[in-house]
Image: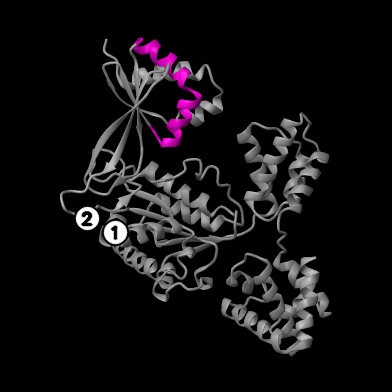
Amino acid sequence: MSMTAQTVWDNCLSFIQDNITPQAYKTWFEPIRAVKLTDNALSIQVPSKFFYEWLEEHYVKLLKVSLTKELGENAKLVYVIRMENTYGNRQPFTEKIPSTNRPSVMKSQEVDAPLKNKNPELKNPFVIPGIRNLEIESQLNPNYNFDSFLEGDSNRLARSAGLAVANKPGGTSFNPLLIFGGVGLGKTHLAHAIGVQIKDRYPDKTVLYISAEKFTQQYIESVKKNNRNDFIHFYQVIDVLIVDDIQLLSGKAGTQDVFFHIFNHLHQNGKQVVLTSDKAPVDMQDIEQRLLSRFKWGLSAELQQPGFETRVSIIKNKLYQDGVEMPEEIVEFLANNIKTNIRELEGAIISLIAHSSFNRKEINLELAKKIVDNYVKHTKREVSIDYIQKVVSDYFQMDVDTLQSKTRKRHIVQARQLAMFFAKKLTKASLASIGSQIGKRDHATVLHACKTVDNLSATDKQFRKYVEDLNKKLTM
């Protein structure tokens, strides 16, 4: 009976799985794909050169034994490495790698092949070999999905909008969908989750995730090579474009211009655009107005710091994924003491588990306190807007309701402006969010308040003392 590449590889995997840890198997063997079987040579596709080198260094003996069992002593293993390719025509070549005490190994790569006297085509890291003329690797992380993005009051709007977009890309009024918020609150996770779900529901759609920084680098490279039009054309064929940290286009006029044209083409053709940013469009500096106006066409959804219940859910979910049990009092202690963002919360959990495992100590409240003390000590403390209002109100001997009131009395207006100034300085909240929480003002009022505080600090000695005193109280 003739064997297929998949049959041979499945048999090899069964043997390999019995001889390594589940985590190692999941990390280094699940991503591999069987490509073809020619005589005694099995071709397998690996995600990168690094991946290939790791297999050769750590698992070559295991691979040799498993493959010899299936194909005999003359078995050969061919690695097909997914690498950067040209956009357009390309011509593959294979390079023989010397072998010592292991299956004969060939490494398949792709190289640029400009035609005759034409300029080299635009180098594009997303095109991979395939049947289609243009097959784009989405660059998505499947671990960032909606199942692992827990819902809470702090993210409900953004998560719901993300689900709507994932279920009907380009077919909702959320186009573009701009997700914004501070560091470590899940913007990138949610952006990937949208892309992952779209790929699951619509396999034929071309989805691409890219950082604004990478996009800028590619654009600069295309200008150097006189291939700007090829660059634009590449992005115009995408069905779902996800750009992370769009605020990094700030001050980059050329990149903003090309993104403007790409955005217009995608939007006019019913394609979906998803953006993430650390600030709302109204707070972005050095971004062209015509681009900002397009960011506002769809929905801007803010991710805020998670509340206590959400933090508890995040901890329990993380522990469940890692197969670790932890007493309820320790879970609540962590949730009560690490409030800044989700990334720091997960980092503290990992530190706690690691200390317990390496030092063979039981996870108890004493150990948790020690970890949190060390962790928080090295983490910049972020105060809340409520706390800032309380400190400012106490300093000027008034209550918070008076601070937030509509009165135009000079000393109350100045207190309110100082609260807005420190909220912008000490928190990651957007101007709109600050204004909403301090007397239901708009972002323009907050911006004016910050400028007024800066001006008065420079010209009024007494006012400068207010700023210095409050700064000490809020940052000590």
Residue 123 in the figure: left or right of residue 191: left
Work out whether residue 267 or residue 453 is closer to the camera in this orientation and state it. Answer: 453
Residue 48 to residue 398: above or below = above
Residue 334 to residue 94: above or below = below
Residue 64 in the figure: left or right of residue 357: left
The kind of secondary structure element at disc 2 is loop
The quarter of the picture where residue 322 lies is: top right
For the point 38% across and 46% down, the residue is 138
The quarter in which the C terminus is drawn is bottom right
Question: How crowded is the residue under tag 2: few (<14 C-alpha within 10 Å), some, or many (20+)?
Answer: few
Whether residue 354 is visible, yes or no, is: yes
Residue 440 to residue 35: above or below = below
Mark 2 belongs to which amino acid? Asn
Locate residue 257, reporting x and y percent. Answer: 35, 69
Picture disc at residue 147: none
Provide the residue span drawn in magenta: 46-73
Proximity of marks 1 and 2: CB atoms separated by less than 8 Å = yes
For the point 80% across and 39% down, the residue is 367
For the point 56% across and 55% down, the residue is 156
Residue 154 in the figure: left or right of residue 402: left
Q: Does residue 56 belong to the magenta stretch?
A: yes
Residue 187 to residue 291: above or below = above
**Which residue position is annotated with label 2?**
119
Q: Does residue 173 belong to the magenta stretch?
A: no
